[in-house]
Image (cartoon, coloured by chain):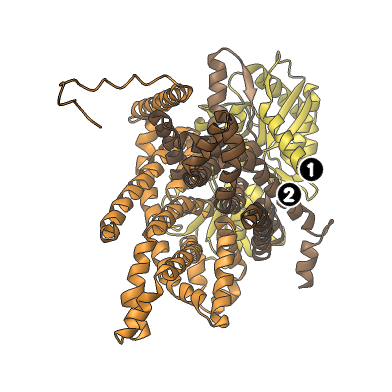
Chain colours: A orange, B yellow, C brown
Amino acid sequence: MIAANPTTGQKRPPPPPRAWTHGRILGHVLMALWIISGISLVYFLASNIASPFVERYWGKYVDGFLVTLQIVGVSLLIGALLSLPIALARNSSWKIFAWPAYGYVYFFRGTPLLAQTFLIYYGAGTFRPELEAVGLWGFFREAWYCVIFAFSLNTAAYQAEILRGAILNVPKGQWEGAAALGLSRPVTFFKVILPQALMVALRPYGNEIILMIKGSAIASIVTIYDLMGETRRAYSRSYDFQAYIWAAVLYLIIVETLRRVWDKIEQRLTRHLKR
Amino acid sequence: MRVLRMAAAAVAVFAAVGAVEAKDWSKVRIGTEGAYPPFNSLTADGQLVGFDVDIAKALCEEMKVECEFVVQDWDGMIPALQAGKFDAVIASMSITEERLQKVDFTNKYYNTPPAIAVPKDSKIESTSDKHLDGAALGAQSSTTHSNYAEEKLPSADLKLYPTPDEYKLDVASGRIDAVIDDVVVLSEWLDTDDGACCKILGTLTPDPVINGAGAGIAIRKDDPELKEKFNAAIEAILANGKYKEINDKYFSFDVYGG
Amino acid sequence: MEDALTLLSFGDQGWGDTIAFGVMITVSLAIATLPFGLLLGFLIALAKNSNEPSLRLAANVYTTIFRGLPELLTLFLVYFGVQIGIQQGLKLIGFDAYFEVNSFVAGMVALSLVFSSYASEAFLSAFKGIPQGQYEGGYALGLSRYQTMALVILPQLIRLALPALGNLWLILLKETSLVSVIGLPDLVREAGIAARVTKEPFLFFGIACLIYLLLAMISSAGLSRVERWTKKGDVAR
């Protein structure tokens, strides 16, 4: 590109105006629709910010929000701890480890979280005598623990698959290099392979966290007052549709914030990999 | 093929925008829940039975209109009425101030007090807030009973369920310590095998603001003429003995109440 | 064991027919959602792949919203909100009518919204896998833009997007379970009713899970056949 011809001093002609193609018109119309919806949403929320509904239920929404974060945080953490042995078993060449791990992962990834939660919550209720005999009834009696239990097992299956893929993704040369340095296999795994695998797995992990936040809305169906639970309670009492709109805004804020923060973290942690 | 036809039918339903012609009320659609025995429930082959259903049929006969029943989850009952899925709700819905802000009601057609049931070996002494402190108390959501628990029994740990069936499962397994509902509904359940676990702890004094003035028929606010028709019909069946006949079919006492 | 078999049998004594009906609803909901989700997803991918910034932005707003909202909430928004919204819209233009969104349609719409926003990502990455030369070749042969898209690009696109779309189909099958909450008698709801009446929740929810697994297996088998079929062209080269 020559900005200006040095001999004549003439400027490059301005680019032709962009034509109003069908695509451009459609894009502007759609954007206009989004902007109008966005503005009316903001207007609607702003005009309701001092309404009796918000005054009455805002505190509940905050409580529900915190419960959602707790459920997701605890489940993800337990799931992460469980996922490591599952992923290792899945990668193992010993069939007695690999097959059960495969069955576990297949079951929890192949069935809906809702059905799993019902199975554990209502199922535990029928096994009360047996659970009491082994002293676990106190645990399964609480809806809260049932939900944590179900969600942890579910996310463990997904995280195990993420981890397994990431571990397989680490080049074989890394193992060989470590072996050549005389490192034992466990040391190689925890100090050399796992950190690299986790780095590769950052993106799918981020997606899993978001899926978990969205999936946690299911807890509201078994008497937990998470963000969704409080929303349904507010709606069932007031029949005011803004109950769901506030919830939608809050969920979008959580998910979008998380996605952006996670992107930043990922960029920072993987900056040495960029060429 | 069947699947395709079902999808096509579903789309047809979606497209069904019917301008409602002049409302002569020759046909009335009635919403009910079908999960609240003995007032309304579904039999195994999908038939609606119960006190509400019989009363509704008697009222329709009295008004000389054709009635069609629509089964709707309790949670969405008032939104569905407002959205026009049906014209009247006959589902043991209590007439309360809160609901009157959204819909209109006929006069009551019965009135029974709420009660609390507990497992037989329960150590809860009474239905007072003090004795229920920390107890897990189950209730059906969006009912006067859940509202009562929220307002009058704040120390209890309230758990909300979509239908009574779920809280029955949970109290039978001991997951919750007590349940609050209509005394008639609880008594009916305690008489069955499933209810053998539990007993009535005591009836509660209804709060006029929360519990309202008995169960009425919910009607949209813009249908006052339908409300009047129902009111007249309620009076008529009370006067001609039809109400008593239905009452005696289900109960050994008078549910109309004071 | 015999008890369980009686409970699961067909006829008056058992819940087999109820469960079977639920399975039919689950499968038909998923199948009914698929074409809408795919079409919408493809259109959104087209928009995202366009040179026009406003179109790309509009499409991105769409996917941000429907990938960020919990599916359960999207379902409630559609089930309660669309009805109220349309009704008020009709009232505004002075048309007093009732508009009914039943739970099947609400489920279909909500699941299509979610499915299409994920499917658009699958299509978009497939678009990136098709070299520019394919378009140019199409134009050089005198095909119109539309013909190039339909005859040259789309067949390759489907093949490239198939594995990701297959995954989304499996997710869709599982997500249909959420409609049980708004009253559609699908597999989970029928299992729930059977569980409440018989007081055997573990049996019935366990059966429901196994049926979902079975559906997933059948789908996987079907998908891998389709994938093999689309790859027939590769071998010949």
Image quadrant for the N terminus of chain C? bottom right
SS at mark 1 in the image: helix
**In front: B64, or A95?**
A95
- Which numbered mark, 2 or 1, is in the foreground of this view? 1
Answer with left or right where residue B119 lies relative to residue B109.
Answer: left
**In front: A105, or B154?**
A105
Q: How many numbered marks, from 0 up?
A: 2
Q: Position of residue B21 (x, y in %)?
A: 71, 15
Q: Position of residue A186 (x, y in %)?
A: 36, 83
Answer with left or right where residue B15 lies relative to residue A141.
Answer: right
Name which residue type carries label 2: Met
Residue occupied by mark 2: C24
Residue at 26% across, 57% down: A271
Farthest right residue? Answer: C11
Q: Position of residue B205 (x, y in %)?
A: 53, 44
SS at mark 2 in the image: helix
Tell me if mark 2 has few (under 14), some (14-19) or many (20+) residues whose alpha carbon lies within 10 angstroms of its own. some
Residue at 69% across, 59% down: C218
Find out whether the residues at labels 2 and 1 contact each other: C-beta distance under 8 Å.
yes
Answer with left or right where residue B173 lies relative to residue A151.
Answer: right
Residue at 39% across, 62% down: A201
**CA distance for labels 2 and 1:** 10 Å
Residue occupied by mark 1: B2
**In front: C83, or A193?**
A193
Name which residue type carries label 1: Arg
Image quadrant for the C terminus of chain C? bottom right
**In front: A247, or B31?**
A247
